[in-house]
Image (tube, helix red, strand yellow):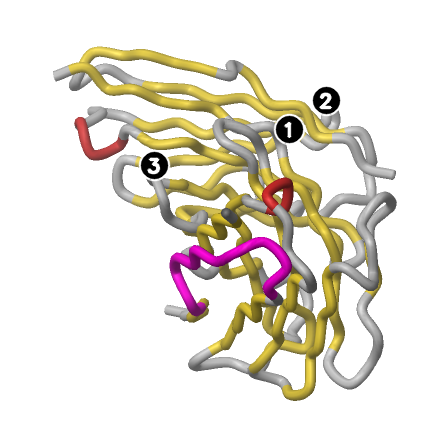
Amino acid sequence: GAVVSQHPSWVICKSGTSVKIECRSLDFQATTMFWYRQFPKQSLMLMATSNEGSKATYEQGVEKDKFLINHASLTLSTLTVTSAHPEDSSFYICSARDRAVNQPQHFGDGTRLSIL
Amino acid sequence: GENVEQHPSTLSVQEGDSAVIKCTYSDSASNYFPWYKQELGKGPQLIIDIRSNVGEKKDQRIAVTLNKTAKHFSLHITETQPEDSAVYFCAASIFHQFYFGTGTSLTVIP
């Protein structure tokens, strides 16, 4: 089945550090990738949608300059949390969707980000 | 936009019993409905999906039903096992956008 690889799985860093998370579709071409944030025992909160070769579309309330998204190829999207602070600590999950119509999103295993 | 509601938020069943999770959606144009299972510390995994031209789909112990008229769809798990314990999310898709329910935490008691 479709596989999405997300790295790293866990990051601990000091406040003020920028952190990059990678999301790769391993066996299909993903024209669209999604980035979610999930708080404990809560649902998925869509942060942004990225289409290959174009700028990401951010959801209301998500800071574009804080969460930089790059989707440079059909198999790779990156999320960079710039100048991270403790309130950015969360579980970040990416997903990718095959270019064909009515295909499901396939999720990575998430990145646990802890800012000290 | 689309609004997906999911019930119940928590569900406990005895091992071997059945579990049913229900979702409703608001936009009749939604045409694709996947279900995801999320285990602790992991990303959601697709377990079954159904398209709007189908009323029911089954995969071993898991089945999904769709009622387009009433705009609701349900996940049925039969003969539940402890490893079925997880959080389950429904979703409705329209124009390549996915709208997720709020999740159901299922606990299967041995």
Residue A40 image offset from top left, x and y in percent: 49, 31
Instruction: Sort mark 1 into few (<14), some (14-19) or many (20+) by Cα contacts within 10 Å.
Output: some
**Chain holding disc 1:** B
Residues tagged 2 and 1 counted as in contact (Cβ below 8 A): yes
**Chain holding disc 3:** B
User: Which residue is painted at 62% across and 51% down in the image?
Assistant: A36
What amino acid is at disc 2? Answer: Ala
What amino acid is at disc 3? Answer: Ile
User: Which residue is painted at 44% across and 15% down in the image?
Assistant: B10
Residue B89 image offset from top left, x and y in percent: 52, 35
Span highlighted in magenta in the image: A7-17
Residue B71 image offset from top left, x and y in percent: 72, 27
Q: Is residue B59 shown left or right of residue A63?
A: left
Residues tagged 3 and 1 counted as in contact (Cβ below 8 A): no
- Give me the C-alpha separation between circle 3 and circle 1: 17 Å
Is residue B101 covered in magenta? Answer: no
- Give me the C-alpha separation between circle 2 and circle 1: 6 Å
Numbered marks: total: 3
What residue did someone put label 2 on?
Answer: B70
Instruction: Sort mark 2 into few (<14), some (14-19) or many (20+) by Cα contacts within 10 Å.
Output: few
User: Which residue is painted at 52% across and 56% down in the image?
Assistant: A14
Mark 3 or 2, nearer chain start: 3
Mark 3 or 1, nearer chain start: 3
* Residue B67: numbered disc: 1
What amino acid is at disc 1? Answer: Asn
User: Which residue is painted at 39% across and 27% down in the image?
Assistant: B76
What residue did someone put label 3 on?
Answer: B62
Q: Are marks 2 and 1 on the same chain?
A: yes
Q: Secondary structure at mark 2?
A: loop
